[in-house]
Image: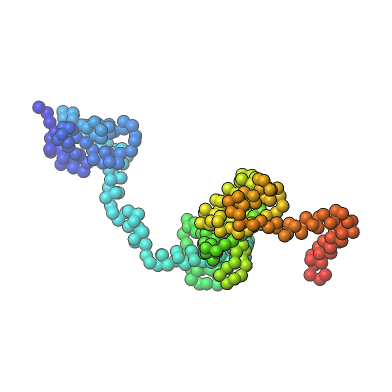
Amino acid sequence: MRQFNPKWFKEHESWLEYSIEKDAAYCLYCYLFRQDVGMQSRGDSFVTKGFNSWNKKEKLDLHVRGVNSAHNQALKNGENLMKQNQHIQSVFVKQSNQDKIEYRTQLNAIIDCIRFLLHRGLAFRGHDESDDSSDKGNFLELLQFLADHNDVINEVLKKTPKNSKLTHPDIQKDIVNAVAYKTTDAIIGDLGNGFFSILVDESRDISIKEQMVVVLRYVDKKGIVTERFLGIVHVADTSALSLKAAIEFLFSKYALSLSRLRGQGYDGASNMQGEFNGLKTSILKENKSAFYVHCFAHQLQLTLVAVANKRIDIAEFFSLVSKIVTIVGASCKR
């Protein structure tokens, strides 16, 4: 009876395997690494079914075929896996300490520039950030200014690979988000477990999307009344239910409890201070200690509008004051 010949192992020792139980031959590399290329190179017979046509030994050579065959591609993938020095982990280990120092130097310079721009409230991007641009925007220009006055940073930036993305806008946004997270975390830490009030207002942005801004007002550990910006939340609409849901989302995000709320300040809109369905009423139902205070700036504005509508001389006075401020403020000589 025809059967598997052990001498075939010497001819195809790199890939040939034999199963005694199934009495069939298989390709080790095709079984592990073969890509789905259909019936190319008769791969299925050496992967799933097994080869047992012992009188057709030439099919072993046909399975290997040319350099770019499916078998040789699988064989190459297996050899690459066995080369430990090519693993990505080995590449990271080989990275010299000097490379790590230079990378950290560049990253610290970028973070310093971002912190400066954030602290001053300045824009990052420029209209034209190409290499030959005379004004690449605040961020790139500030980074170059820092390099011009620091030889170490200048040397590192010159050696930076062209494919480095540390100055890319996406990386800038990631760092800004990290700074925002740490800043908010510091605010929440300063608040601690104390009581606080919220100031809320809503408006549309330039893309006509409704957004709500929330400010915390509390007494810090030094006894000073402090107001801190907490965040902006986009809302589907400006109904009281949507605004309350947005406030609850912010509270849960920063581990704030509605039971510690002792004040709420809004404008005089019906969705805010409505007696039945307003945001003020919705919060008071859950916490009766969250007293409502009508925003004094809005009260003053409403008072001035009401008085100006009744008295023409008052309206003319404020119109004249506005023109005087414009004329004087527009010129340093005046």
Q: Residue at x 52, y 63 (%)?
A: 193
Which residue is more in the foreground, 299 or 177? 299
> Which residue is at 26% across, 38% downward?
31
Q: Quadrant of residue 333?
A: bottom right
Q: Which of 187 and 51 is in front in this view?
A: 187
Q: Nearer the viewer, residue 198 or 250?
A: 198
Residue 127 lies left or right of residue 94; in this view the side is right
Quarter of the image with the C terminus is: bottom right
**Is 279 located above or below residue 153 in the figure?**
above
Q: Is residue 165 left or right of residue 63?
A: right
The residue at 51%/68% (across/down) is 154
Specify the color scheme: rainbow
Q: Is residue 34 left or right of residue 187?
A: left
Image position, residue 285 (x, y; %): 60, 50
The N terminus - image quarter? top left
Measuring from the top left, give residue 2's x and y in whole percent.
12, 28
Question: Which quadrant holds residue 51?
Answer: top left
- From the top left corner, tell me how far across and down residue 245 is, in percent: 58, 48
Identify which residue, 100 or 228, lies in the foreground: 228
Quadrant assignment, res 9: top left
Q: Can residue 311 be seen in this view?
A: yes
Let me know if residue 72 appears in the view: no
- Judge whether 158 appears above or below 86 on screen: below
Percent position of residue 169, x then y:
55, 55
